[in-house]
Each structure stands twice: as C-alpha cells, then as structure tokens.
Image (spheres, rainbow, N blue to C red):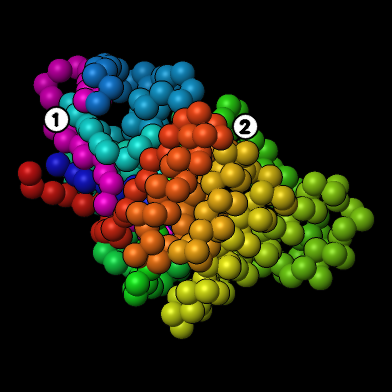
Amino acid sequence: MIASPGRVNIIGEHIDYNNGAVFPAAIDKYVVCGIQKTDQDECSILALDKKELIHFNLTQLAKFPTGHWANYIIGVINELHQKGLSIAPVEIVFSGNIPMGAGLSSSAALENAIVFGLNELFQLHLSKTDMVQISMHAEHHFAGVQCGIMDQFASMFGKKDHAILLNCHDLSFEEVPILLDNHKLVLINSNVKHEHVDSAYNERRRQSEEGFSVLQCKFPELKGLCLASINQLKAIQEEISPIVYKRCQFAIQENARVLAAKAALTKKDWKALGELLTASHRGLQHLYEVSCPEIDFLVEQAILHPGVLGSRMMGGGFGGCTINLVESDQINDFVDMLQSIYLKQFGQSTDHYMINITDGTKMIDL
Ligand code: GLA
C-alpha cells in the first residue's frame, strides 16, 4: 500500500510557476492506495469513497470529463507512456481523508500515490523528482490545470515536523523545522469552491507569464518573474496592462514575504510571521485577485480575534481553506467564534483541521 499526504502552504502562493520560493509542508491527511498486476486485459480502478469502479485499456487512454478523479490516475499513466515507460494492466483501489476542493492537494496526493506505486511495481527507476514532474504534467495534460510544482513536491518530499522551503527555479530546497512554541497552524475550510476556478488559475498564470516575457526583453538575464525587483517592474510599467502589472507586483512581493517568513520562523518572531501571512492575503485579494467573499470574511474576522497572529487564504483560491497562526490556548474560542459568525453570514458552516506535519509519499504496511 502507498500513503500519500496532502499539503498546507505556510506562505508563497501562486509563485511556484513564476520561479519563486514557496513554503509548504505535507500533512497527516492521506490518499491510501493499493496497486497490483492483473491477468485481465484491462486496468480497473476502484474509488472506494465514491463507490465508483472504472475499467480502461492501456492502449486507449482517454480523458474523463473535467474534474473527474480518473484523470489524475490515467494522466499519470499517460505521462509514463510519453516517457516510453511501459506498464502492464493493473488493479488499483484507493481511499482517502483529504477533503476535496479544500485546497489541500488531494489530487497531487493521488497522482503521487499512483506514480510511486507504479514505480515500485514495475521497477521504473524514477527518482522522486521525476515522479513529482510526472504528477505535475498529468495535471497539465489530463486535468487541464497549468499548476506549478509545489503541491506534488510537498506531498512527495514532505518531512515530519518540517516545512520545505522550495526554490521553484531549480528545485533546490531546505527542510525547516516547524517548532511554533505555544502556537498552532489552524485550517478553516470555507466549504465553498467557486466555479471556473481552473480557467481563472490558468488565466493568472498566463498574465504573469505575459509580464515576465516583457521584463525579459528588457532584462534578458532574469530567470523568473519572482527574481525581478520592483524597480525592474516599474521600468516596464508603460508596456504592460494595469492588470498584468498588479499580477507581477504581487509575485515579486510574495516571493520577498516567503524569505522574510522563513527568517521570522527561525527567529521565533511570531508577530512578524503572522503579519506576513495577513499581508500575503491582502496581495492575493487585491493584486492577484484569487480570493472570494467567503474567504475574505474568514480572514477579516480571524484577525480581529485576540489569539490570532495572522490569517490568509491558502492554495489556488476562490474558496477552500484559510491558514491561521493561532495561540494554542485560544484555538477553541477562535474556531467556535468563526463557526457561528460564518453560519450567520453565509448560512453554511466551516470545518476546521488541526494538522500535524508529516513525511511524504511512502509505502506502508497495513
Ligand atoms: C494550486 C497549484 C499550485 C500552486 C497553488 C497556489 O494548489 O496546484 O501549483 O500554484 O495553487 O499557490
């Protein structure tokens, strides 16, 4: 069996695909998956939680409708084929407890579980980095989301009690101990997922790439949007639209916040760390425009609470979870307060998750 975790991201949102630095960690919520060879001509996959069984032939890898879980699995197999790595028919069964659509990367966990399991079963000799890239490309080509590499990387490379400071430019990374003293990271799930999230995500990526291509004409030595300075961005302001300018401004500022957050964490400066989280949210809300009213409400209310040092939306946006830095003895009060005020405002409840930071994708014995 393979266990593959979801992830949180402490800070560094929407900059993995702009060669920025991000700060995610694998969490103790998993996709668990069994894979074995079969004599049948077809592959079969049983999604236990959905109670759905599908069959397909390895010579005819077709996409399922957008959003269907099968795309993450068949997408991985398709990437293996593209690399000239052949597998024989398999039976797969999987289940999990990562809430879907909450921004905790259940899809990256599933992709990683599949590529990890197939790598073991067929002795494909893929490195962890190869597997992460296969998972990411499966998302691009089968699920239709032009995501960066953060989710798959965090899920695969996670380390217990450490966050990963990942430099997406060259995939170098540092494992940073997460020792928060008398604080905890608390996730609040808004339980909303707005429509057209994937196309809005892809549009943000296009806009920031557009800004970068103009920057690169003027500064050919630049290796990524996040590696530019605000002064360099100002130098091309007249050549790009105000929207593209805002997207680029966010990316450059967010990258600086990630590095500052790592420094704050190392110095145990919880106040500074909290302020960086909230500043990240402001950028995502006003410059990158990937938040939504429900999430903005949760952040506004959170930072009014005396036990909360900082709060922000987490993941791709337009719904999902907020991540909050909270004093441990105030957590119950904080969670109850948000629950009732959110219910009153939006007529639906929040969920909250206390997470532990855990190891990445691995084989387990049941
Ligand atoms: C999604 C993507 C990631 C990343 C985040 C935003 O989770 O899969 O690659 O871009 O959004 O930080």
Outermost left residue: 366
Q: Residues within 10 Å of mark 2 (few under 14, many from 20)?
A: few
Residue 91 at what x, y percent from top left? 18, 26
Residue 273: horizontal and vertical position, in percent? 52, 71
Query: Secondary structure under badge 1?
Result: strand
Mark 1 surroundings within 10 Å by alpha-carbon count, few (fewer than 14), some (14 through 19), many (20 or more): some
Residue 294 part of the magenta segment: no
Q: Which residues are magenta?
A: 21-48
Residue under pointer 2? 199
Question: Disc 1 versus disc 2: distance between alpha carbons?
Answer: 37 Å
Q: For this rendering, which residue is in front, 80 or 160? A: 160
Q: Quadrant of the C terminus?
A: top left
46 with respect to 318 (left or right): left
Give the amino acid type for the residue marked by disc 2 in the picture: Ser
Q: Vertical placement of 154 versus 63: above or below?
A: below
Front in this rendered view, residue 66 or 310? 310
Q: Residue at x 71, y 67 (%)?
A: 228
